[in-house]
Amino acid sequence: MLFSRSTPEQKRQSLVSKQLAAQFELTDKHVGTWVTVSGDDVLITLPFAAATVHDALTAHIKKAAHEENLPIQNIVIETDIQASPTKVAKVTNIKNIIAVASGKGGVGKSTTSVNIAYALMAQGAKVGLLDADIYGPSIPIMLGNTDSTPASRDDKTIIPFAAHGLVASSIGYFVPAENATVWRGPMASKALEQLLRETGWPELDYLIVDMPPGTGDIQLTLAQQMPVSAAVIVTTPQDLAVADASKGIAMFNKVDVPVLGLIENMSLYICPKCGHQDHIFDKDGGVELAKRNKVPLLGQLPLNVKIRQHTDEGTPLLVAEPHDPLSQTYMTCAAAISKQLYMDGLMDLRIQNI
């Protein structure tokens, strides 16, 4: 009878795979293809953005290798995000379009969109932001570049506007702030399509789309005529917001756009002086909505004046105070979004292979 022995490289491959599987709650089989071993060196290529755990992951792997007497000299972690399949042809240079929707205005969706975009960048992804609210664009104010003017290199596509390293596009850059955009639905939908397809986007892993409230023409245009990879729903715990967020989930389900999960905004208020917690907008409404719809709860954000102040000043929290605990909450949400989109892609492959 013949027995085969694992080589040192194979042992290192197995050890690293086990550490990755434990870190991301996956199986060794899932993560095996992420690892390349060459002698004492290890290259890990993650298919989602998770830069905040790179250092801890490296330390865990080196500790495990030391305990197993398998010396590892160098560990390099890279990010290579793949494009999720879509029914509509992709937009040039954009791998994934993620719609951030609410169903109801006033829940902090735009603020969440902006901070999630910056958080995804901090997690290692290439990110852009599209303001899909044609009637009430707010992204230029939030990014602090309302004075930016459109420019083009080829008279065909617009150079995207930049702020703190993030590229963005919004009708707000084209229409004076004091003017009202009085357009019928089809015209507004056409404007959104032009903003998406006639902007010269650089290579992006994710384009975050800040959706207007409701489930009307613009939402249907984006969902049915554009290559949307997935959606994220933002709500407050309040019954009225939850009811409208539920309609948003139903809309995306009807047009076969997967919902990656739900972010509960303004979950509670924490007094900065005494630490007392007050559930101003009710409690756990978003938590229960996520359970009912069997989607992940991606995160819960408190009602905090700093989020509003930095947004009004055009320096979002992730830019102004990246190490603030609130910023870290956005970072956790962003990592969960990136991983969930990858997991949904795996599920699509499994279904296709049945």
Image: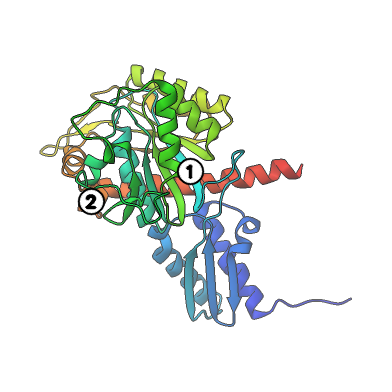
Q: Position of residue 274 (x, y in %)?
A: 12, 37
**Spatial CA span between label 1 and label 2:** 28 Å
Disc 1 marks a residue whose amino acid type is Ile
Front-most of residues 316 and 291: 316
For residue 262, say whether it is visible: no
Residue 89 appears at what percent x and percent y?
59, 43
- The numbered disc on residue 324 is 2
Depth order, front residue of 75/176: 176
What's the residue at 33%, 33% (across, down)?
109
Q: Residues within 10 Å of mark 2 (few under 14, many from 20)?
A: few
Instruction: Give residue 305's quadrant in the image.
Output: top left
Q: Which residue is rendered at x = 45% and y = 36% of the image?
A: 193
From the image, which quarter does the N terminus lie in? bottom right
- Looking at the image, residue 343 sits to the left or right of residue 276; the answer is right
> Could you say which is closer to the camera, residue 209 or residue 61?
209
Residue located at (52% from left, 28% from top):
252
Q: How is the image coloured?
A: rainbow
**Among the two numbered marks 1 and 2 on one chain, the one whose residue lies closer to the N terminus:** 1
Q: Secondary structure at mark 2?
A: loop
Is residue 201 in view from this perspective? yes
Disc on res. 194: none
Residue on which disc 1 sits? 97
Number of other residues with Cα within 10 Å of mark 1, as a class: few under 14, some 14 to 19, many 20 or more: many
320 vs 113: above or below: below
